[in-house]
Image: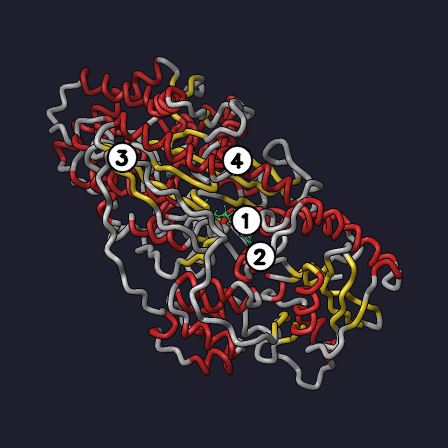
Amino acid sequence: MTWIKQKDKIDGAMKAKVYSFFEKLQKDDTSPGLHIEPMQNPADPRVRTGRIDQKFRAVLFKVFLDTIPHYFYYGAWPHDQAIEIARSSVLNVNSANGVLEVLRKSAPANTAEPARAKTPPVPPKPEIESAPVTVPAEVWVNPLAQSGTEAADLVSRLGLDEELVQAAYAAPSDDRLIDLLGDAPDWQATALLELAAGMSMAEVEDKLALNQFVVDPQATEEEKIKQALEHPATKMQFTFIGEDSEELRRVIEGGDFDAWRTFLHPEQRIYAERHYNGSFRLSGGAGTGKTVVLLHRARMLAKSEPSSRVVLTTYTTTLAESLNNGLSRLDNELRRAEKPGESGVLIAGVDSLVSRVLHPATDAEKRQAMKGLFGMELPAPSNLIGTDPSAKQWEYALASVDHGLEPELANATFLQQEYETVVLPNLITAKDDYLKIPRAGRGTALNRAKRLAVWKLIEEYRYHNRIEMHATYVEMAHLAACVLRQRGDGNRVADHVLIDEAQDLHAGHWLFLRELVKKGPDDLFIAEDSHQRIYGQKVPLSRFGIGIVGRSRRLTLNYRTTQQNLAYAVGLLKGAPVTDIEGEQESVSGYTSSRVGPTPLEQAAPTSVAELDNLAATLKTWQEDRVDLGNVGILVRYNNQVAKVISGLDERGMRARNVDASDPAGAPMVMTMHRSKGMEFTRVVLYGLSADSLPASYKKLAPAEQADALLRERSLLYVAATRARDGLVVSWSGKPLELLGAV
Ligand SMILES: Nc1ncnc2c1ncn2[C@@H]1O[C@H](COP(=O)(O)OP(=O)(O)OP(=O)(O)O)[C@@H](O)[C@H]1O
């Protein structure tokens, strides 16, 4: 049996009935209780309906493959609708590209504006004093009609349905366009979306692998269907169930929510399954399924070579936990590794991996690493310190050394960046080496006198850390890299390393990850979105012996959020000078989504008290509209705002919880924007985005560092705004944050 991805959601009771229908069908398709019946005058004579219960009938296609009856399950509908769908639907192997699809031979699509009920509307603004936001009404221009691509070419070359193409070219609005794609085969809907987002026919052909198969006109229909089932674009919508009742339960139970486990975009499938000669980079906007690709790829690598050691890592432990849950949901049986060097999949945050390599290393290895990094053969430091204590150490060094530097350079941010991007990666241990080293990529130039002053400060900083046996996470990563480098190719601890959120890693991480695995096929697979870089500095990979030239691709179809939220989030990045991990200009062109929803709402309040009133009122309205508040995220810029928002809401009779607390269950979660990385919510409020919400330290930086800090703030807003699946509210008091003006 083959399951065709369901467009309509099936509720709980229905799921059980569909499951039992399938079980019976699999045992004996002639069982009278199933009522498998052909149609009179159907568009496709292979169509059948079957009895799910008194009200619902299943629509199926019965095909003989190798003389064995094979059922394609299309869906279940109330009796009359099922009959109508069964009569008009055709299982078709597209003659232009060999993709299997179900076409509905129905009356021409109605181009009138439909009533939209799919996405619950965002409530009107609460009636309190607030500055209205006026959004100029824009005239919608149909991007397909404007693209210069002839509709006829889409039909003859790409194999798109003529009726669908005509309706799409005539669509009067974005909503209507997306609406009519709802009934189209998935690959056709995706092709039209990608064309509407500005892609050329050739790009769409490539992304959907439409030019991979040649349909043999002499082949029998059954042969064509068998071949079509292997097409990546068919697999967007069709999955073979076979005897695997677990797989059946998954597709039924998981529904739309877990579609990622089964129905991949052809591009996602290719990146998950293909072998590469060396390192590979997968970029793509927020929500385009990079993490999904990594999970499938980790599984593929572990399954295809059971003794292999696959490391799946990311920036933080929280994100690693979510990868862990994801992989368990994808395949609970997959062999897992506990520590580096073991067969199976090892999932850990990158700093945790560092300590798992460093901790068991021998004293001699660690001393050697200390010598390489700091120039002194000492025991490895035992106290790990974070960013704040490290900043204090820089302040201390600044207070102790007579440096004569101007304030723009004499600050912890500049010194730390200099130390982490120039000194540590180049293993600089002596003044003369620092004076000579090229500082490519560092925005602020330093003459000899300034370099001497900076070096004095670095020596002081290191001296204190040594006395106190302190080291930062960054230094630990470098030490672990040194340990692994000494061991060389004969003693690598991984065969494949997969990295999520790679834009946030620093040079030390890259050197460490490079040393985890021997250079060669499928060594490093890197998923990143430079627009989401909120930590760390820009670091071109080529500096760390990671060559990805010619092995770099970008995903553009957003599965998480709506067109409206995406446009808002991308708007926040307008004109931002973002470079990718190879140092090339990164673009947001082509980003699109297949879902529509309400326009993001900007809520201005005169005071912070009124802003809290706004928030409480918004949540109350959502509650009245039966929105599950447990799926709402309230995202703030700073940690200390979390408790304030929770208690402010409490005073207004609304309960909310810290993201790390489990109580009160079902209440909206409040967290920092940084913490929201990698998460998603049905609705999101970006709270407290007032003019003064930029970090206080920002103004003190040198222009180059200031520009980078500002870019990270924009990226942070982009990350936060793209967490919303449906509704997005942006709120502030007094004057709004200037960066919002970009939208
Ligand atoms: N092929 C797919 N079918 C259905 N849903 C999908 C598919 N691919 C991804 N998704 C869903 O889209 C959402 C975003 O996916 P994912 O987290 O992998 O994206 P991402 O690119 O890693 O995002 P971010 O960069 O924001 O972390 C998830 O809810 C995921 O389940």
Q: Residue 673, which numbered label?
A: none
Q: Amino acid at mark 1?
A: Val
Query: Toward the viewer: 96 or 12?
Result: 12
Which residue is the site of mark 1?
Answer: 292
Q: Residues within 10 Å of mark 2 (few under 14, many from 20)?
A: many
Residue furthest bottom as drawn: 218
* Residue at x 23%, y 49% (from the top left corner): 134
Alpha carbon of mark 3 to alpha carbon of mark 2: how far?
A: 39 Å
Q: Residue 320, which numbered label?
A: 4
Which residue is the site of mark 3?
Answer: 732
Discs 3/2, front: 3
Which residue is the site of mark 2?
Answer: 264
**Which of the two labelled residues, at mark 4 and mark 2, occupies the earlier sequence position?**
2
Q: Amino acid at mark 2?
A: Leu
With 144 as the anchor, is 334 left or right in this view? right
Whether residues under marks 3 and 2 lie with C-beta atoms below 8 angstroms apart, the answer is: no
**Which of the two labelled residues, at mark 3 and mark 4, occupies the earlier sequence position?**
4
Alpha carbon of mark 4 to alpha carbon of mark 1: how far?
A: 13 Å
Q: Amino acid at mark 4?
A: Ala
Q: Residues within 10 Å of mark 4 (few under 14, many from 20)?
A: many
With 625 as the anchor, is 537 left or right in this view? left
**Which of the two labelled residues, at mark 4 and mark 1, occupies the earlier sequence position?**
1
Query: Toward the viewer: 431 or 459?
Result: 459
Whether residues under marks 1 and 2 lie with C-beta atoms below 8 angstroms apart, the answer is: yes
Kindly tell me whether mark 1's CB lies below 8 Å from ligand 1: yes
